[in-house]
Amino acid sequence: MNTQSHAVPESPMNSGVSAPGYNAALTRPFYWSLRRETWENRSIYIAPLIVAAVILSGMLVSARHLPQLRRKALLLDPAHQRAAIELPYDIAATMIIITAFIVGVFYCLDALHGERRDRSILFWKSLPVSDFTTVLSKVMIPLMVLPVIILVIIVATQFIMLLLSSAFLLPSGLAATTWANFNLLQQSFILLYGLVAIALWHAPIYGWALLISGLARRATFLWAVLPLLAIGFFEKITFNSSYFGSMLKDRLLGFAAEAFNFEPHHGVAIDSLTPGRYLSSPGLWLGLVFAAICVAAAIRLRRYRGPL
């Protein structure tokens, strides 16, 4: 006689063995939340693309002066020659990176405030997606998605600039000088390293903007900036010092001194990278801790804040 078993099958959490697709089921809400943020915020790639188009248009307009400028650059010593030829490509990358930073800050300022303002938070809260997953997907846009987009746009822009430069210099026989002094593959690796360093260094700025986005009822930009200005003015008037302002300046630009070893007029090469010094910098880790606190507070705010 057969006896029926009343044992309850173990869940994947208790069995110690993950069922097929179980981990994917956990990560799928985060993946689709990330996709939603990308779909709804097209400025994260449209704005850098517009800047890239402006840069390429400017290069086309000034193309007639390129052979003359290249001849002057070739009269310099090798180090200055390389720096002079790389300068337009560095300027293009810098302009796109600055644009990405501005886009990232304004994205974070609107990330939680926007869904409260248009009351779409009621719909998103009805879905089986936790506040932790939602806020984490939002903070990953400036920290992960935007740097990848910027990397692709900058490399594509610099490649088009190389082709245009070669075409304009070909009649004068100077086309090979560009490829000899600008290694796109090496510069792309340096750019990737720089974008990661910038994103991590600016993490507390994005975290602060995200916190203000969930806290303020209106004028998120003013609420994000005015307290910082007030602290700076108070310190200057009371103690006649500017330590807070110096700290803010270091948070904006301090990554360069930690992540690179710059030599005047020599450009940036592989041996200029200093990842050890960057990773051992107290400013990096203190900033990441502050960013984590801001994100945790933003998660809690989203859990209990309703529409405006």
Image: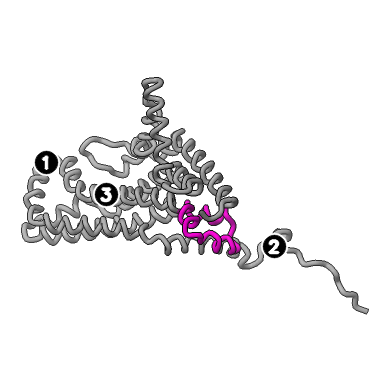
Disc 2 to disc 1, C-alpha distance: 67 Å
Position in image of residue 183 (x %, y %): 25, 52
Disc 1 to disc 3, C-alpha distance: 26 Å
Tell me which corner region of the image, top left, top right, bottom left or bottom right, holds residue 233: top left
Q: What number is the disc on residue 170?
A: none
Q: Residues within 10 Å of mark 3 (few under 14, many from 20)?
A: some
As drawn, which residue projects farthest toward the top?
239
What residue did someone put label 1 on? 76
- In the rendered view, tell whether residue 265 sits above or below residue 49: above
By secondary structure, the bulk of the magenta-drawn segment is best described as helix
276 is within the stretch colored magenta: no
What residue did someone put label 2 on? 12
Disc 2 to disc 3, C-alpha distance: 49 Å
In the image, 283 versus 29, the foreground residue is 29
Element under label 3? Answer: helix
* Badge nearest the viewer, 2 or 1: 2
* Badge nearest the viewer, 1 or 3: 3
> Along the horizontal axis of the image, is 291 left or right of 46?
right
Q: Residue at x 8, y 43 (%)?
A: 75
Q: What number is the disc on residue 95?
A: 3
Q: Residues within 10 Å of mark 1 (few under 14, many from 20)?
A: few
Report the magenta residues as a range. Answer: 111-139
Residue type beneath disc 1: Leu
* Badge nearest the viewer, 2 or 3: 3
